[in-house]
Image (cartoon, rainbow, N blue to C red):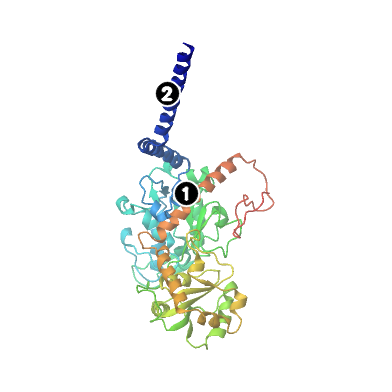
Amino acid sequence: MARKSSLLKQTLATILVLLVVYALLNTFLSPANSSSSSSSSLPKSTSKLETTFPFTYANSASIESGFSRENANNFPGKSVLKVYLYELPKRFTHGVIEHHSIARGRRPADDVALLQYPGHQHMAEWYLYKDLTRPDPDRVGSPAIRVSDPDEADLFYVPFFSSLSLIVNTARPAGSSSGPDQARVMYSDEENQEALVEWLEEQEYWKRNNGRDHVIVAQDPNALYRVIDKIKNSVLLVSDFGRLRSDQASLIKDVIVPYSHRINTYTGDVGVGNRKTLLFFMGARYRKEGGKIRDLLFQLLENEEDVIVRHGTQSRENRRAASQGMHTSKFCLNPAGDTPSACRLFDSIVSLCVPVIISDSIELPFEDVIDYRKIAIFIDSTSALKPGFLVSMLRGLTTLRIMEYQRELKEVKHYFQYEEPNGTVNEIWHQVSQKLPLIKLMINREKRLVKRELTEPDCSCLCTNQTGILTSL
């Protein structure tokens, strides 16, 4: 009897062990259950991440899955930047275009829709405004959407044409030609700057966060110079920091945007067969500040064989000559101007003419997505001014190496073309969207800080155009 009881216990134990093993095998080796469980939990996780980190999730997801940011944009449900476009008084937008026309003796169009924004090198303000005012069906795929309710907005866009206003011809009688259609109107950019700030300071949403969640274009180095301290909390879209103090603008808070290229885009393929000139430059020889190096480079290069350096200002004829020169040259010289950057760099890029950058303090747009070492040659000012150094170095580069530069230029040139559907405008909105977490941080931080009198500008621990992070006061 005892023996039977022992056998029964052993049998039961064996059966129990087999059941446990079967259960384990069924759990870990069943592909259907594993796949179903994984796929059903993924949308919940994704939704939570998108809600918590709306402007960083898409980028991190694309990195984890091995896709580029452009491919990430194709995923449905991706969060986009919600922008409220201020309806500014006409004097700050189309009124500036009208004054620009009148100042040049032309009668502006009576219909605002027919007004043509004049071409110049700081046109980001026009292209961004034009983008936000397009019909919604034409904006499919844009990183930013326009919202009509300001309470839904992440950021507020201020569409003042500040760079155009600067070149209207300050405080000069406009429409100097005689005739009944030519009113003599005085235009002052400084007055418009002051009026803009007065208007903004009356707006509920500006006062709410001291303008921190506002986006303002100040692309010309002198744009908004009179009121820059009153708008410095905002996200500024600038060409460089050449005339801005470290407490006014920084890489952390603001966005570097490209100049508008002023010559025709090169449509040919890579190669050097039709590029007989080694090095080309056409522009103003005499500049102020860091641009003084131009005259010294002229003296070194003007007698070099297969090098063309010409003095020239902005004109239709000179732009044609510059297009021809850049399209038939292997390298294009890009020295500093009055500020570290100049539009010539972006002309070079769309010409597939390898930029040779001689500007020790230059800041460049979109450096998180573009490695400029692959598309340009950087030479410090001291080395560039050594007799024979520059041309010897360029002549030493092989045809294969030049073509490598050209291929890279061709890959990225859409980032510098404002009229491309997925070009400069979209990338600017990408860059602006990346500022949102910092904007929220600064808004919340500012609300809880104890107000105190400061004896020097407060950089809020985060602003410096030297790319570092300052220690808190």
Pointer 2 residue: 15
Q: Is residue 72 visible?
A: yes
Q: Which residue is mark 1?
A: 60
- 279 or 162, nearer to the observer: 279
- Residue type at mark 2? Ile
Q: Position of residue 3 (x, y in %)?
A: 47, 14
Q: Position of residue 197 (x, y in %)?
A: 51, 53
Q: From what the image shows, is residue 183 above or below residue 210?
A: below
Q: Is residue 74 left or right of residue 471?
A: left
Q: Say whether residue 159 is visible.
A: no
Q: Position of residue 465 (x, y in %)?
A: 59, 59
The residue mark sitting in front, 1 or 2, is 2
Q: Are marks 1 and 2 in contact (CB under 8 Å)?
A: no
Disc 1 secondary structure class = helix
Q: Relative to residue 135, is residue 448 depicted above or below?
A: above
Does residue 153 appear left or right of residue 441 in this picture? left
Element type at mark 2: helix
Q: Is residue 225 above or below residue 15?
A: below
**Nearer to me, 350 or 336:** 350
Q: Quadrant of residue 119?
A: bottom left
Query: Most extreme residue toward the top, as rendered?
Result: 1
Dot 1 alpha-carbon crowd within 10 angstroms: few under 14, some 14 to 19, many 20 or more: some
Q: Nearer the viewer, residue 376 or 160?
A: 376
Crowding around mark 2 (Cα neighbors within 10 Å: few <14, some 14 to 19, many 20+) is few
Of residues 193 and 14, the one nearer the viewer is 14
Mark 1 and mark 2: Cα distance apart in space: 49 Å
Which amino acid does the dot numbered 1 rest on? Answer: Ser
Number of marks drawn = 2
